[in-house]
Amino acid sequence: MARKSDDHLSATRSFKFNTRLKPLFAREDLPERWLDSPIEEFIAAHNFEKPVEEGTTPKLLVVSCIEFRFMPQIPRNFAYMIRTAGGRITQIPGSEFALAYILANGVRHIVTVGHNDCGMTKVEAFKPRLVEALAEQGWEQDHAKNFVEAHADRFAIDDEIDALESEYVRMRSLFQKVEIAPLFVSLSSSRLHLPSWFEKYK
Ligand SMILES: [Zn+2]
């Protein structure tokens, strides 16, 4: 699990003022190898008011959190999408199966999108409500409690930007011949940013 430190502000607590994200105002702000790729198309749709044109074959995989305040601005026939609580597919056993399917269909570009104010940073406090939600569906109280305890750590994160980094590192080691773009969306503006930590992986 990502470690908290005092020298930076959590994305949950302070999005606007932190220096841990780089805005993407123009295509010059993108890493060169993303230019003229489906990753540029995805970013341009969110940040440069340039909608993706609907195609006929899948070009991209979009991985993101289930968060309802984020909706990728893409047309159909452009991308596969995997959404999980926290958006970290390497934490879900067997998720490589879906990845294999997507790769087998020719996709070679992935964007993994983190966001501020993620509910997965508040899992510990939310546990009683999760248990209650399952109990309401007919689960035995003890079974529901054990289930939530058993799975909470897989989904819980301390900090959204650090969690995106560890996920990016794991994805890179699992899928070495695809281009993976870690991006961070501001829920208030729907604009994408580049995490500052990405500099060291360029
Ligand atoms: Zn989230």
Image (cartoon, rainbow, N blue to C red):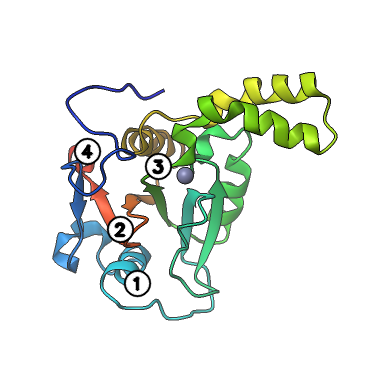
Secondary element type, mark 2: strand
Q: Between 185 and 174, which is closer to the camera in this rendering?
A: 185
Secondary element type, mark 1: helix
Left-right relation of 56 to 20: right
Question: Which residue is the site of mark 4?
Answer: 197
Indicate which label's residue lies in the foreground, 2 or 3: 2
Secondary element type, mark 3: loop
Residue 138, above or below 77: above
Question: Which residue is the site of mark 3?
Answer: 176
Question: Which residue is the site of mark 2?
Answer: 192
- For disc 1, the neighbor class at 10 Å (few under 14, some 14 to 19, many from 20) is some
Q: How far across and how far down the image is residue 9, in percent?
A: 23, 33
- Residue at 41% from the left image edge and 36% from the top image edge: 167
**Which image quadrant: the N terminus?**
top left
Q: How far across and how far down the image is residue 195, in percent?
A: 25, 45
Spatial CA distance of label 2 from label 4 is: 15 Å
Which mark sits nearer the N-terminus, 1 or 2? 1
Residue type at tag 3: Gln
Q: Between 92 and 101, which is closer to the camera in this rendering?
A: 92
- Residue at 43% from the left image edge and 42% from the top image edge: 118
Secondary element type, mark 4: helix
Tell me which corner region of the image, top left, top right, bottom left or bottom right, holds residue 30. Answer: bottom left
Asked whether the beta carbons under mark 1 and mark 2 sit within 8 Å of each other, the answer is: no
Indicate which label's residue lies in the foreground, 3 or 4: 4
Spatial CA distance of label 4 from label 1 is: 23 Å
Residue type at tag 2: Leu
Residue type at tag 1: Ala
Question: Which residue is the site of mark 1?
Answer: 45
Q: How far across and how far down the image is residue 41, in percent?
A: 34, 70
